[in-house]
């Protein structure tokens, strides 16, 4: 009788590669939640630096070196996020699904479509359209 093995998720595969990389270098002892959160913040700032002073950061405003730098900084951010999740016991997939569900309630389609206002504005003034006030968008807050 053979048992079917489930495919490993991309995040689990990356977590295992990162664990091995860090373990081989004896770096795991430095990976406290505080240190990882701080490193994540630094790498996010380094990512932002590539977009600083560009009109929008659209692809046509970047050269090959800029695109490569952005790609590498994004990888650094993801590595530290995966490590932080690993060291704090957070299942990132579950956390994202949970957060999307919370944001569905905060940003109902009928109120939030085409608007970038923060969810608190919808209860106070649910009929007003404001696409110029960019307080979020994306996945919410």
Image (spheres, helix red, strand yellow):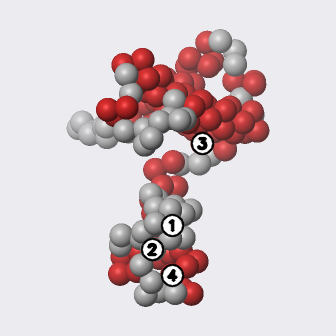
Among the 4 quarters of the image, the one containing residue 83: top right
The residue at which mark 4 appears reads as 122
Q: Residue 92: x and y, percent?
A: 51, 48
Residue sitting at 54 percent across and 70 percent down?
A: 118
Query: Marks 3 and 1: in contact by CB < 8 Å?
Result: no
* Image quadrant containing the N terminus: top left
Cα distance, mark 2 to mark 4? 11 Å
Front label number (4 vs 3):
4
Front label number (1 vs 3):
1
SS of the residue at dot 2?
loop
Residue sitting at 31 percent across and 37 percent down?
A: 7
Asked whether 71 or 29 is in front, the reply is 71
Cα distance, mark 4 to mark 3? 32 Å
The residue at which mark 2 appears reads as 130
**Labels 2 and 3: the sequence-earlier one:** 3
SS of the residue at dot 4?
helix
Q: Which mark is residue 133?
A: 1
Residue 52 visible in rendering:
yes
**Labels 2 and 4: the sequence-earlier one:** 4
Q: Residues within 10 Å of mark 2 (few under 14, many from 20)?
A: few
Q: Residue 33: x and y, percent?
A: 72, 39
Cα distance, mark 1 to mark 3? 32 Å
Query: Marks 3 and 4: in contact by CB < 8 Å?
Result: no
Q: Residue 63: x and y, percent?
A: 37, 22
The residue at which mark 3 appears reads as 85
Cα distance, mark 1 to mark 2? 6 Å
Cα distance, mark 4 to mark 1? 13 Å
């Amino acid at each position: 009788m053979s048992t079917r093995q489930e495919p490993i998720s991309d995040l689990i595969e990356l977590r295992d590669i990162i664990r091995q990389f860090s373990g081989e270098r004896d770096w795991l002892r430095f990976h406290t939640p505080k240190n990882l959160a701080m490193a994540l913040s630094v790498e996010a700032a380094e990512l932002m630096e590539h977009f600083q002073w560009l009109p929008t950061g659209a692809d046509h405003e970047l050269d090959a070196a800029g695109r490569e730098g952005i790609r590498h900084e994004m990888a650094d951010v993801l590595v530290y996020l995966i490590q932080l999740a690993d060291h704090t016991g957070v299942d990132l997939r579950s956390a994202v699904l949970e957060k999307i569900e919370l944001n569905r309630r905060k940003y109902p389609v009928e109120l939030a479509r085409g608007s970038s206002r923060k969810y608190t504005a919808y209860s106070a003034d649910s009929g007003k359209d404001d696409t110029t006030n960019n307080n979020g968008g994306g996945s919410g807050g």
